[in-house]
Amino acid sequence: LQTFLERSAASVEDPLAGATWLEVILSRTYAEMAGETEEPQISDELYLTTMSSVISELAAGENVVLLGRGSQMILKEMPRATHVLCIAPQDLRAHRLAERDNIGLNEATKRINESDRGRGAYYRKFWRVDLEDPRLYDLTIDTSRVSFETAAALVVLAARAKAAVGASG
């Protein structure tokens, strides 16, 4: 983020209008950016440019894990990036959320539905893709079938295998 901010400050087209500008971009929910909940505070172009810059800068580092925000689209040409889709049935995700956030199951289910709808709309709007299209990913893991520890080990194995293929060819 530091590099991104320094580059933004040095550019002629500096979009930073105040201390909260980057916070606005990074804190927007999928639904907000897809235009489902309110009027946009920033333009779609500025949002995509900013997110692409931030994600690309972060990905330039070593051993970085990025979650969402179109990173599989932004980094699709990066040979060493491993793109993973984790899935689970909605009822299991709701139970996990309810337990994690200490909320009722109905509230958790509502949040899951809103999140799923918002993420789907976000990917359709900005990337014109189906979020769950397996062609966007190197690996898909159903976390209802394996433990989180096993899922993490599979991701590491896939990343190492992809790196080895990239290094040899």
Image (cartoon, grey):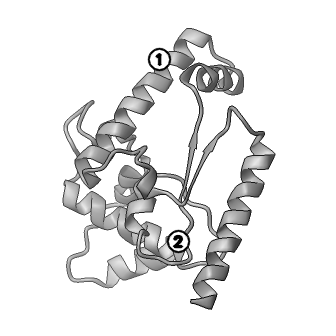
Say which of 2 and 156 sits in front: 156
From this viewpoint, is residue 17 visible? no
Q: Residue at x 41, y 75 (%)?
A: 77
Say which of 167 and 121 sits in front: 167
Q: Is residue 127 left or right of residue 165?
A: left
Q: Residue at x 56, y 19 (%)?
A: 108
Q: Which mark is residue 110?
A: 1
Residue 125 vertical position relative to residue 9 in the rendered view, above or below: above
Q: Residue at x 44, y 31 (%)?
A: 115
Residue 142 vertical position relative to residue 138 in the rendered view, above or below: above
Q: Residue at x 71, y 21 (%)?
A: 99
Residue 41 vertical position relative to residue 78 in the rendered view, above or below: above
Secondary structure category for the residue under label 2: helix
Q: Report the quarter where the C terminus lies.
A: bottom right
Numbered marks: total: 2
Tell me how far mark 2 sits from mark 1, CA to CA. 32 Å
**Marked residue nearer the N-terminal end (2 or 1):** 2
User: Which residue is disc 2 drawn over?
Assistant: 58
Residue 21 placement: quadrant: bottom left
Q: Horizontal and vertical percent for residue 89? A: 57, 26
Residue 39 placement: quadrant: top left
Secondary structure category for the residue under label 1: helix
Q: Is residue 152 left or right of residue 169?
A: right
Mark 1 surroundings: few (<14), some (14-19) or many (≥20) residues within 10 A: few
Q: Amino acid at mark 1?
A: Lys
Q: Which mark is residue 87?
A: none
Residue 82 vertical position relative to residue 120 in the rendered view, above or below: below
Q: Amino acid at mark 2?
A: Leu
From this viewpoint, is residue 8 visible? yes
Say which of 145 and 67 sits in front: 145
Q: Horizontal and vertical percent for residue 83? A: 53, 60
Q: Horizontal and vertical percent for residue 94? A: 59, 21
